[in-house]
Image (cartoon, rainbow, N blue to C red):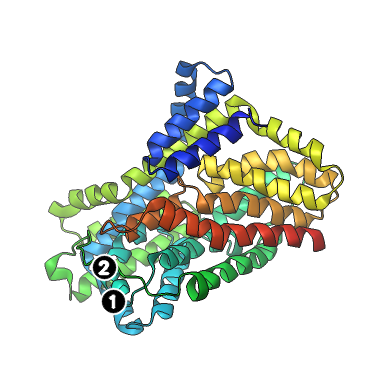
Amino acid sequence: MLTNPVLVSVLVLCLLCLLKLNVLFSMLIAALIAAVMGHIPIPQAMELFTAGFRVNANSALADLLLGAFASSIAYTGLSDLFAQRLSGAVGGRRIFLLMGLAGAACLSQNLIPVHIAFIPIMIPPLLKLMDRAKIDRRAASCALHFGLKAPCIMIPFGFGGIFVRLLADNLTANGLPVEVSDITRCGWMLGASMLAGLLVAVFITYRRPREYEARAAAIPEPRAESNQNPKAFAVAGLAIAVVLAVQIVINDLSISALCGLIVLFGFGAVRREDIEDQFANGMRMMGMIVFIMLAAGGYAEVLKAAGGVRELSEAVAGLIGDSRLAAAVVINLIGFLVTVGIGSSFSAIPVVTVLYVPLCQQMSFSKSAVIALISAAVLFGGIASPASDTALGSTAGLNADGQHDHIRDTCIPAFFHLSLPLMLFSVLLSQII
């Protein structure tokens, strides 16, 4: 196991990120280490790496378009108005503000499916309010993580719909026929464990006031005349409704975002001469995140070619014997390693299901237990992975003034307060259902 390319590569990735090396650079180094250990020539490894960009290409295009959409909404002044209203509603009450962030993140996954694109728009204007309330931004990061991940397994709509259908299709393809309703039924129980972890973060771990320096944050500026322009607000609201309606009808986030942009541009909420700027702003907000997502798909391809995932699973399976408890723990741990390396819960689903559905059936786990274990295995690695779009998006907003560290303030708190409870609860659940 100590020479397993997947295990060594993922550990190197985590170590380099902890040393504050750039995530993309760390991923490239980790991929090359996996290739060398898997006896893959370096040129071939780089070909695999770049070919793997296609894995997350659809999500990357959607996020870029959603970034332009979010920037255009900010241009109309609607997001600024929302931030002002939220500030006025919660005042200095830290709990209400943190729960408001979690709620907004939930909406971004299901009702208004803009994913992480709302974070660089909405969070920077709130940093001064958060600093006046002396909120520890690690608690805010946990709130955003909860809102971005919990709905994926609980609510089969928007990104949640994509996640549960992908999971259902892969479970069925590997010999465990399931319906979407089977997954969401277990999903609500898993979501409860994440909520418990969030409450621990807010009320216990990060309850003490934390001081931050008074620094200017990078805040997207709305068009001056749009600040109190009812027409611009109405068009922005219509665009959001169109995005929602198109998502309901055709279930494609890229086309939904494109339709929303057409409404904003067509009805003049964004002036013609400023359209190019909104796409540029969207690229600036989402470009690095999207490229890391693409690179994560390439890294996943190198890990698969290195051949260590199945070998690691088989090596551990030989040690657990007939213990269902040990099997549940192993499924979670290796799922965590795979997903941390891949960086995407969505991309990890095909890998984890093909490995563990047969093992779970061999260990006589019930259908609900298999769903709980595999759902948790692909979710909690994506929560804490340095390459996760959830973690990257949270850092992009909370670090707008340069006072929030990606690993220590985003990934580590999310691991202890969301990933760990999810793992423990899924293991316990698998033993009793």
- Above or below, 31 relative to 395: above
Residue at image coords 17%, 69%: 226
| Left or right, 22 with reference to 296 | left
From the image, which quarter does the C terminus lie in? bottom right
Please provide percent x and percent y for residue 68: 29, 53
Q: Quadrant of residue 179?
A: bottom right
Frontmost residue, 295 versus 53: 295
- The residue that mark 1 highlights is 132
Could you tell me which secondary element the residue under label 2 belongs to? helix
Please provide percent x and percent y for residue 52: 48, 31
From the image, which quarter does the N terminus lie in? top right
- The residue that mark 2 highlights is 125
Frontmost residue, 380 versus 189: 380
Q: Are marks 1 and 2 in contact (CB under 8 Å)?
A: no
How would you rate the neighbour count of disc 2 (Cα within 10 Å): few for under 14, some for 14-19, many for 20 or more?
many
| Left or right, 4 with reference to 234 | right
Q: CA distance from mark 1 to mark 2?
A: 13 Å
- Above or below, 101 relative to 296: below
Amino acid, disc 2: Pro
Residue at image coords 17%, 76%: 228
Residue 403 appears in the rendering: yes
Residue 433 appears in the rendering: no
| Left or right, 185 with reference to 12 | right
Residue at image coords 70%, 57%: 372
Residue at image coords 52%, 46%: 344
Please provide percent x and percent y for residue 74: 25, 63
| Left or right, 229 with reference to 173 | left
Frontmost residue, 345 versus 128: 128
